[in-house]
Amino acid sequence: MSEPTRTVHIRIEGRVQGVGYRAFVEMNAADLGLAGWVRNRRDGSVEAVVQGSTPAVADMLELCRNGPPASRVERVEIVGEGVGVFSGFQVRPTT
């Protein structure tokens, strides 16, 4: 039997642009075997969807709360769950 899959749509606020945050998310998603995407938002936040095993998604949420060394994460908010089916992980253009 395969493990249950969890999909979360998250928004990260703080000093999260211009500090390698998207690359950080992309690298960690690959390490954790997650699918989805990440992008900057014009309001200065970062938005991502991550999909994978429940433990891997929990690990990613914790990594997002810490961020890369140059970041200062003020808030990680789950804005939705169970949205879409993804294959691979990509960095999307700013929206």
Image (spheres, rainbow, N blue to C red):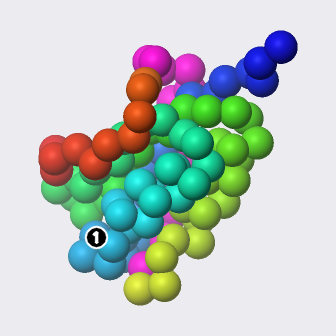
Residue that extends furthest to the right in the rendered view of this protein: 1
Residue at horizontal 46%, vertical 18%? 85
Query: 62 or 14, which lies in front?
Result: 62
Per the picture, the main secondary structure of the magenta-coloured stretch is strand
Q: Give residue 80's position: percent from left, percent from top.
A: 51, 30
Q: Could you tell me if residue 55 is visible in this image?
A: yes
The three-letter code of the residue at mark 1 reads Gln
* Residue on which disc 1 sits: 17
> Is residue 82 highlighted in magenta?
yes
Residue at horizontal 28%, vertical 70%? 17
Query: 77 or 36, which lies in front?
Result: 36
Q: Could you tell me if residue 79 is visible in this image?
A: no
7 vs 59: above or below: above
Residue at horizontal 77%, vertical 18%? 2
Q: Give residue 5's position: percent from left, percent from top.
A: 67, 24
Q: Is residue 58 left or right of residue 35?
A: right
Q: Is residue 73 left or right of residue 53?
A: left
- Crowd band around label 1 with a 10 angstrom C-alpha radius: few (<14), some (14–19), many (20+): some
Which span is picked out in magenta? 71-85
In which image quadrant can residue 57 be found? top right
> Is residue 76 highlighted in magenta?
yes
Q: Give residue 95's position: percent from left, percent from top.
A: 16, 45
In which image quadrant can residue 82 be found? top right
Query: 87 or 50, which lies in front?
Result: 87
Residue at horizontal 59%, vertical 72%? 66
Which quadrant of the figure contains the N terminus? top right
Q: Give the SS element for disc 1.
A: loop
